[in-house]
C-alpha cells in the first residue's frame, strides 16, 4: 500500500421476591427466578450505537484494509473481510481503492489512538470530547470508532445548526413524517484497533469477521444480560468463541443494509429485529424440511 493510502487507512440476574405470610406460624417463602431471554429488539439495541437518534451505515462502496500484520497475512485478512462485507450484500469498492474500513493491529492500542488523535484529528470525525476520552481510556483489547456525517434522508447535504445543539441540523426541503427521519447518518470511515497479544490463538477469519462486525456498523461489545445470541462480538469475552460471523451476525448486518436509511434509531433497530426473527424462522423451517424423509 502506498504512503497516501496508508495515511488514509491509519488516518442480570434480577431477584424479584414473593413473600407469603398466612399467619404468625407460617414460614416466609422467597422465590427467585431468572429473567427470560432478552427479546430480539433488546438484543439488537444492546449492541447497536445510536448516532444523534439514527443508525449510521456506509452509503458508499466499502474498501477494507489491514495494517500491522505481515503482508501475506494482511492480504488474507483483507480478502476475508471483503467476503464478509459482500455476504452482507454491501457494495464493495474495486481492488486498489482508498481504504474506508481499516483494521490496525498494534502492540499498544491506547498509544496508537493517542498518537493518531494528535497527528490526524480528522480521523476521529465528530466524536465528542466525552467519546474521545472514553476511547482513549478503554483498556481494550479492541477499540473501534467511526467517522460519520449527517445527510438528508434522500442523501442531500444538511447544515449543522451552529447556534443550537451539536445534534441539531438545518434540513431544507425535507418531508417530515412519523414513518421516517428527515436525516440519515452516513459512515465515511470505520476503524478497528486490536492489541497484538489479544489475537494470539485466533484464526485469521475470526480476526477479519470481528473487524467487519465492529466497523461495518457502529456496534459495541455485547452486554450479556441484554443480549440473547451468539456473536463474534464476544470474541474476547467468551471461552467458547465462534469461528466467525454467527447466523445472528450475518442476518443483523444484512438487515442493517436492507432497505432505505431514512429511519430513526428505534424504527431501524425494530426492523432489524424483525428481519433477524424471520431469518431464524426460515432457518428452522429449512431444518425441519431437511429432516423430513
Image: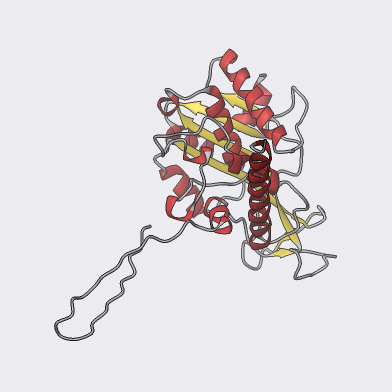
Q: Which residue is at a point 58% across and 29% down the rendered structure image?
A: 208
Q: Is residue 53 above or below residue 139?
A: below
Q: Which residue is at a point 62% across and 61% down the rendered structure image?
A: 166
Q: Quadrant of residue 147?
A: top right
Residue 233 makes an appearance in the image: yes
Closer-to-camera residue (174/262)? 262
Q: Is residue 224 above or below residue 234?
A: below
The image's colouring method is: secondary structure
Tell whether 289 sits left or right of 47: right
Q: Is residue 102 above or below residue 148?
A: above
Residue 123 makes an appearance in the image: no
Q: Residue furthest top?
A: 72
Q: Is residue 117 above or below residue 166?
A: above
Q: Which residue is at a point 59% across and 13% down the rendered structure image?
A: 72
Tell whether 140 sits left or right of 218: left
Residue 32 on image: x %, y %: 31, 65
Q: Quadrant of the C terminus?
A: top right
Residue 169 on image: x %, y %: 71, 63
Residue 210 on image: x %, y %: 55, 34
Q: Residue furthest bottom?
A: 23
Closer-to-camera residue (23/153)? 23
Closer-to-camera residue (18/61)? 18
Q: Residue furthest right?
A: 173
Give the total of numbered labels.
0
Q: Which residue is at a point 50% across and 48% down the rendered structure image?
A: 132
Q: Quadrant of the N terminus?
A: top right
Q: Residue furthest front?
A: 293
Residue 40 on image: x %, y %: 57, 55
Tell whether 31 sits left or right of 265: left
Amino acid at each position: 500500500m502506498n504512503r497516501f493510502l496508508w495515511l488514509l487507512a491509519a488516518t442480570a440476574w434480577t431477584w424479584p421476591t414473593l413473600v407469603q405470610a398466612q399467619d404468625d406460624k407460617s414460614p416466609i417463602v422467597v422465590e427467585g427466578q431468572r429473567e427470560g431471554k432478552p427479546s430480539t429488539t433488546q438484543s439488537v439495541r444492546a449492541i447497536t450505537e445510536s448516532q444523534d437518534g439514527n443508525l449510521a451505515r456506509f452509503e458508499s462502496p466499502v474498501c477494507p484494509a489491514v495494517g500491522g500484520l505481515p503482508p501475506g497475512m494482511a492480504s488474507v485478512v483483507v480478502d476475508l473481510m471483503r467476503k464478509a462485507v459482500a455476504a452482507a450484500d454491501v457494495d464493495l469498492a474495486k481492488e486498489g481503492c482508498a481504504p474506508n474500513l481499516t483494521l490496525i493491529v498494534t502492540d499498544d492500542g491506547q498509544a496508537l489512538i493517542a498518537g493518531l488523535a494528535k497527528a490526524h484529528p480528522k480521523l476521529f470525525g465528530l466524536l465528542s470530547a466525552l467519546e474521545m476520552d472514553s476511547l482513549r481510556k478503554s483498556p481494550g483489547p479492541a477499540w473501534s470508532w467511526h467517522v460519520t456525517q449527517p445527510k438528508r434522508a434522500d442523501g442531500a447535504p444538511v447544515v449543522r445548526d451552529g447556534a443550537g445543539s451539536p445534534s441539531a441540523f438545518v434540513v431544507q426541503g425535507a418531508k417530515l413524517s412519523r414513518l421516517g427521519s428527515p436525516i440519515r447518518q452516513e459512515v465515511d470511515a470505520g476503524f478497528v484497533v486490536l492489541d497484538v497479544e489479544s489475537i494470539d490463538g485466533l484464526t485469521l477469519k475470526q480476526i477479519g469477521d470481528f473487524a467487519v462486525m465492529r466497523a461495518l456498523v457502529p456496534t459495541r461489545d455485547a452486554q450479556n444480560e441484554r443480549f440473547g445470541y451468539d456473536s463474534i462480538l464476544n470474541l474476547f469475552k467468551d471461552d467458547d468463541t465462534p469461528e466467525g460471523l454467527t447466523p445472528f451476525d450475518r442476518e443483523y448486518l444484512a438487515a442493517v443494509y436492507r432497505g432505505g436509511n431514512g429511519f430513526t434509531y428505534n424504527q431501524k433497530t425494530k426492523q432489524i429485529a424483525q428481519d433477524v426473527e424471520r431469518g431464524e424462522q426460515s432457518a428452522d423451517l429449512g431444518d425441519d424440511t431437511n429432516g423430513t424423509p
